[in-house]
Image: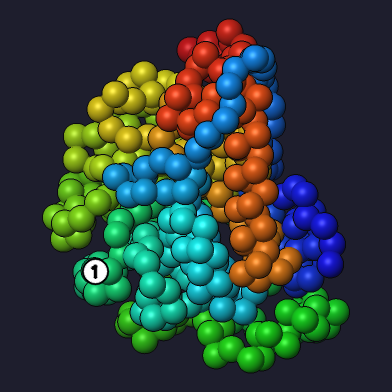
Amino acid sequence: MAKITEIEDLKRIYKRRTPKMFYDYCESGSWTEQTFRENSSDFDLIKLRQRVAVDMTGRSTASQMIGQDVAMPVALAPVGSTGMQHADGEILAAKAAEKFGVPFTLSTMSVCSLEDVAENTTKPFWFQLYVMKDREFTKRAIQRAKDAKCSALVLTLDLQILGQRHKDIKNGLTVPIKLSPHTILDLATKWRWGLQMMKTKRRSFGNIVGHIDGITDMSSLSVWAAESFDPKLDWDYVKEIKELWGGPLILKGILDADDAEMALNVGADAIVVSNHGGRQLDGAMSSIKALPSIMDAVGDKIEVHLDSGIRSGQDVLKALAMGATGTYIGRAFIYGLGAMGQHGVEEALRVIHKELDVTMALCGETKVQDLGKHNLLVPRDFYGDWA
Ligand code: GLV
């Protein structure tokens, strides 16, 4: 068995074992992919302050996100079609998260349904909601999340229309897969993936199939999003959703200080500074660069989380030191899942935890809560001087 020492190891195995169309779905940004790239490369602009002769015993990464205990402030992000990256992917990832003690967020566009994940786990998970034109579906989805005992609703605000990812169109990506000479060729060498897929009955969008009417073609996310996602979603409707849900609400996809203020005003419990992993507005600022202005605007009034671009424990540390209370990994856990199923997700979490712990120690800190700007060297022009 290959020795896994970094997230990149999992990515290499994932690429070998997973059909190209699903690897490409994960490893893409929209249009030119500038934001997708900068989400990661902007982390490299921030340097860590090495401190020495500090007692580094008794370290802990334990913390809280929205008042819930976490073994480290790193949740699994909602990722659409996770169950196509590996058979029963959402259940496996949720189990890994549960074992590790971090939150798992189930996407509306998951393959395993809310009910399926609830049946196969023992701790509450979080549910990510996409708002559909069919408002009854949205109401039912919220009720289903309550019935499944989800402990937070993560409402995504940055995907009412889908950013174009060229590769998905060129690969003819659909869920479930439609067989064509192109897709058969793609699947032919991925026998391990195929065998596991043949053993499961979960191969479609489990939260949607049988729960929504009037969809003519739901197999392509782009067609489906265009037909079904509600482009009218606005702050008034966010308020309504908050009332309907009545529990902890996390608003995901905030990249601008003005929107962060709006999120605060509707009474969200937390926001996620996110550009959807660079998959929506290409040309937008990276999440880590957007964080400082959002912290300045609302950081002392609402819990601020961050996703997009995190591939290591060092990245997590930088986000926390810049003021985030929690972070999310999407691609980093998908690499593990596609490489080795549940064990791979556990490996991804183990790698990131170790990196976070050791980096924290070498920065002279023993608790994630004590991390702050004093641990960083941030270029004076990091945020940029924008007109
Ligand atoms: C869906 O959330 C996607 O980004 O593909």
* Image location (x, y in percent) of residue 287: 52, 34
State which quarter of the image contains the N terminus: bottom right
Amino acid under disc 1: Lys
* Image location (x, y in percent) of residue 97: 50, 61
Observer-nearest of 216 and 148: 148
Observer-nearest of 88 and 352: 352
CB at mark 1 closer than 8 A to ligand 1?
no
Disc 1 residue crowd, few under 14, some 14–19, many 20+, Cα 10 Å:
some
- The residue at the point 59 percent across, 89 percent down is 200
Q: Is residue 196 visible?
A: yes
In which image quadrant can residue 35 be found?
top right
From this view, report whether residue 8 is shown above or below residue 326.
below
How many numbered dots are placed on residues in this image?
1
Residue 313 left/right relative to 114: right
Tell me the residue that label 1 is attached to: 146
In which image quadrant can residue 317 be found?
top right
From this view, report whether residue 34 is shown above or below residue 48.
below
* Image location (x, y in percent) of residue 365: 54, 24
Q: Is residue 168 visible?
A: no
- The residue at the point 60 percent across, 37 percent down is 357
How did the renderer colour the structure? rainbow
From this view, report whether residue 79 is shown above or below residue 355.
below
* Image location (x, y in percent) of residue 302: 28, 33
Element type where label 1 sits in the image: helix
From this view, report whether residue 335 is shown above or below residue 1.
above
- The residue at the point 37 percent across, 43 percent down is 64
In which image quadrant can residue 173 be found?
bottom right
Observer-nearest of 222 and 54: 54
